[in-house]
Image (cartoon, rainbow, N blue to C red):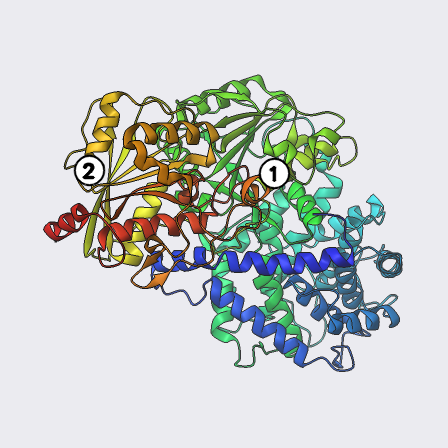
């Protein structure tokens, strides 16, 4: 996340490829979990479709450009080339690719006055490193756009195809606003009266139904002309345009919290869209229907509004399914205006619409009334855009509520709760929040206007959800402050952040004395820059700097009830005085994975070492935790008896916690005596524990924090073990397995990557059931046989 330059772009392009490979295991697990469905699109389908479409566009490039003559629309020269380049860059292609360099040179050297062409060129300029030449090109184009808007008469606030023409359409007005907005985001100064003119034009032309048509409600046809219908595409254009003007004209209205802010024109249009979404991505042909441009428009309002659904319809899923059904064998989409245009629009929908979600903003009620969750309606939208600009990638945000399945909360690792009232979640809602946390999620709270009522209730929520942990001030050396892109030591003012940790990762954060949403809402990137950098650091912390998931990808795994297990294994989780259960969600996830992938049912139970014995309870025992481990003589004897009787003991330091690791090693020495000397060295890479049914575990990877602090570029596993009577009876990992089993990438963990930790535990468990694969316990084999 450094300033743009050529080398940075190459590193970023390579980084995206690495991220994609790292997420393959996650995607495969998710697909195996949920099985086949009626959906045409899954993440692999989308990847393949984008790649094929990119190849198609390159195949159509001639003399460094993509241009086709139209018999209308005025002079739009360079427009199709700009659209194609915009799509390719959005798909992750490098601006330094020779083919794109040629196209950009063509755009720089070829003047144009067409509104569509200029608007799309500005989109391209905003995606490039801001060199003096690029900034000059953008300034030239946006100057024409600002100067050619109609400022009087019936078409006030809109555009002709070219400056001085007497025709107009709302479509041209929308694309022009997008171009000017791209320039404004790049630092070009746009006068407020421009946005006022644009906003008034769209409001005046809104149909009473809530939607928009190509010419607006005031258009009166003459002669043989017909009145234009209200369409999803034009309505999406109107919604997206009003979201832009809202940012520039109405942000200050939310400085002082006064309850949720609504825009009646946007709300009415969204209602129309929800009621008429059946017209989108439908194979039936409607009047003035341009399906690929419409999908592009739908993606823009999805990104602007944070809405995942229109009337319970997942707009991205429906759109992606339609595109999968209708793409040609050569990777293109055809129709009005040609394959290059439609393929570009399809790429933009697929690539931008699935961009990673920075935060889910929680919509919540207090009693039977809406809570003040949206007093700063553009806070998360603005911080998402800022983080995306710093990271040089497309990022999105979403609005969620607790009526949705808890799995949907995990579209983002962060659930953002803002307000200035006392929070009053129901028992069912609190349980969903707890499940979100246990499955790897992070809740971020913001007390708007430093609300004491909100702060007090959020602290109580933390106690209710996580009674075993305390809300405390993050230490100065916390990974959020020291190990991310923006070191806190450089901030003029370091905000106080309270956090609840399980000793390995943060689960809840609260900003009690700074109003994050106010700074984000009004985009105070000057005087309050540290609050933007803090948000970026929290996001980077939550994804281990780079392990972001695109839409449709998930590490969540649920048991597929259709699969009937063929083998069984009993696992005892060992409870001791102290933090023995930092990640209760890990065993739920690994159990689901073994059920779905291996037809192995895992029965997990808790055994309190201070009260219960391990005899005949389990095949495998897992001892993990954070902080110092202190066992009684009776507990040590119980563990020794369990192992001597054929049981397999797994021990790991959750989060790579050094205090637990050191004390666990001392306890293992006390339990196993001289046999524990074997723990001094890792098991060899060719040890049978790393093989199942002849398949060796490959691609061992560590979290970035572990590479920085411990293992460097080591690519092999570091498990240690104690072999007794020819079998591997004890498996010990001073590096984390427990947090990794949850699946969420997060910073500050000394351990294996989530995919590797998951596979290591899977191999350990499968080997305990398969005596032919590696030295295992006779007890496990006997238990399996008797359980069938």
Residue 722 is situated, as x and y percent measured from the top left of the image, at 31, 41
The answer to whether residue 571 is above or below residue 158 is above
* Residue at x 84% of width, y 50% of height: 188
Task: Depth check: give the residue in front, 441 or 83.
Answer: 441
Residue tagged 1: 262
* Residue at x 65% of width, y 33% of height: 482
Residue 618 seen in the figure: yes
Judging from the image, what secondary structure is the residue with disc 1 in? Answer: loop
Residue 573 is situated, as x and y percent measured from the top left of the image, at 28, 35
Whichever of labels 2 and 1 marks the residue nearer the N terminus, that label is 1
Residue extending farthest left: 786
Task: Depth check: give the residue in front, 20 or 195.
Answer: 20
Residue tagged 2: 644
Residue 235 seen in the figure: no
**Quadrant of residue 687 within the rendered picture:** bottom left
Residue 416 is situated, as x and y percent measured from the top left of the image, at 54, 35
How many residues crowd around disc 2 within 10 Å: few (fewer than 14), some, or many (20 or more)? some
Residue 472 is situated, as x and y percent measured from the top left of the image, at 53, 20
The answer to whether residue 211 is above or below residue 466 is below
Judging from the image, what secondary structure is the residue with disc 2 in? Answer: helix
């Amino acid at each position: 996340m450094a300033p743009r330059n050529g080398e940075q772009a190459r590193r970023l392009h390579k980084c995206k490829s690495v991220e994609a490979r790292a997420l393959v295991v996650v995607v495969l697990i998710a697909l195996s979990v949920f099985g086949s469905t009626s959906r045409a699109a899954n993440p692999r389908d989308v990847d393949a479709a984008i790649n094929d479409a990119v190849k198609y566009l390159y195949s159509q490039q001639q003399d460094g450009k993509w241009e086709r003559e139209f018999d209308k629309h005025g002079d739009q020269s360079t427009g199709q080339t700009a659209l194609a380049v915009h799509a390719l860059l959005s798909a992750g292609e490098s601006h330094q690719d020779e083919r794109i360099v040629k196209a950009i040179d063509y755009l720089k050297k070829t003047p144009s006055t067409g509104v569509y062409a200029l608007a799309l060129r500005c989109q391209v300029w905003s995606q490039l490193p801001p060199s003096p030449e690029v900034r000059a090109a953008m300034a030239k184009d946006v100057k024409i756009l600002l100067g050619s808007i109609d400022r009087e008469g019936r078409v006030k606030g809109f555009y002709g195809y070219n400056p001085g023409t007497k025709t107009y359409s709302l479509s041209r007005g929308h694309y022009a606003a997008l171009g000017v907005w791209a320039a404004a985001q790049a630092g070009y100064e746009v006068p407020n009266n421009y946005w006022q003119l644009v906003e008034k034009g769209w409001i005046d032309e809104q149909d009473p139904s809530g939607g928009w048509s190509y010419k607006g409600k005031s258009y009166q046809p003459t002669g043989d002309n017909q009145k234009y219908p209200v369409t999803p595409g034009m309505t999406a254009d109107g919604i997206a345009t009003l979201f832009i003007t809202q940012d520039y004209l109405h942000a200050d209205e939310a400085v002082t919290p006064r309850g949720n802010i609504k825009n009646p024109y946007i709300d009415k249009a969204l209602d129309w869209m929800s009621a008429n979404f059946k017209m989108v991505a439908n194979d039936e042909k409607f009047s003035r229907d341009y399906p690929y441009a419409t999908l592009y428009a739908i993606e823009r309002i999805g990104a602007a509004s944070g809405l995942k659904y229109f009337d319970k319809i997942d707009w991205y899923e429906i759109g992606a399914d339609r595109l999968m059904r209708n793409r040609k064998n050569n990777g293109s989409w055809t129709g009005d205006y040609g394959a290059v245009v439609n393929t570009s629009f399809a790429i933009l929908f697929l690539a931008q619409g699935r961009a990673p979600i920075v935060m889910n903003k929680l919509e919540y009620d207090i009693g039977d009334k809406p809570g003040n969750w949206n007093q700063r309606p553009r806070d998360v939208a603005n911080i998402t855009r800022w983080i995306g600009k710093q990271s040089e990638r497309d990022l999105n945000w979403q609005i969620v509520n607790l009526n949705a399945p808890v799995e949907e909360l995990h579209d983002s690792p962060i659930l953002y709760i803002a307000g200035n009232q006392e929070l009053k979640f129901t028992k069912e809602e609190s349980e969903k929040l707890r499940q979100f946390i246990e499955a790897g999620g992070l809740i971020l709270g913001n007390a708007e206007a430093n609300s004491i009522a909100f702060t007090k209730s959020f602290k109580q929520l933390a106690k209710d959800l996580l009674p075993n942990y305390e809300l405390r001030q993050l230490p100065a050396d916390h990974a959020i402050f020291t190990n991310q892109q923006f070191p806190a030591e450089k901030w003029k003012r370091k905000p106080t952040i309270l956090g609840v940790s399980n000793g390995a990762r943060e689960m809840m954060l609260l900003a009690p004395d700074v109003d994050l949403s106010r700074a984000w809402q009004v985009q105070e990137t000057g005087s309050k820059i540290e609050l933007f950098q803090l948000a970026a650091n929290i996001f980077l912390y939550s994804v281990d700097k780079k392990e972001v998931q695109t839409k449709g990808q998930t590490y969540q795994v649920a048991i597929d009830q259709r699969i009937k297990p063929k083998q069984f294994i009993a696992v005892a989780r060992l409870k001791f005085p102290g933090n023995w259960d930092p990640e209760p969600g890990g065993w739920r996830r690994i159990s689901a994975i073994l059920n779905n992938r291996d037809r192995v049912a895992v029965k997990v139970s808790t055994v309190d070492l201070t009260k219960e014995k391990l005899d005949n309870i389990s095949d495998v025992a897992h001892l993990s935790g954070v902080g110092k481990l202190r066992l009684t003589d009776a507990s040590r004897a119980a563990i020794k008896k369990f192992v001597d009787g054929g049981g397999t003991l797994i021990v790991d330091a959750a989060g790579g916690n050094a205090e637990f690791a050191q004390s666990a090693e001392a306890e293992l020495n006390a339990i196993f005596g001289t046999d524990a000397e074997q723990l001094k060295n890792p098991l060899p890479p060719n040890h049978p524990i790393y093989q199942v049914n002849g398949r060796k575990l490959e691609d061992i990877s560590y979290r970035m924090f572990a590479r920085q602090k411990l293992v460097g570029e080591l690519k092999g596993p570091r498990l240690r073990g104690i072999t007794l009577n020819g079998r591997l009876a004890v498996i010990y990992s001073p590096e984390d397995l427990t947090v990794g089993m949850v699946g969420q990438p997060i910073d500050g963990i000394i351990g294996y990557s989530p995919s590797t930790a998951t596979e290591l535990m899977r191999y350990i468990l499968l080997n305990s059931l398969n005596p032919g694969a590696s030295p295992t316990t006779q007890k496990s084999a006997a238990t399996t046989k008797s359980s069938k």
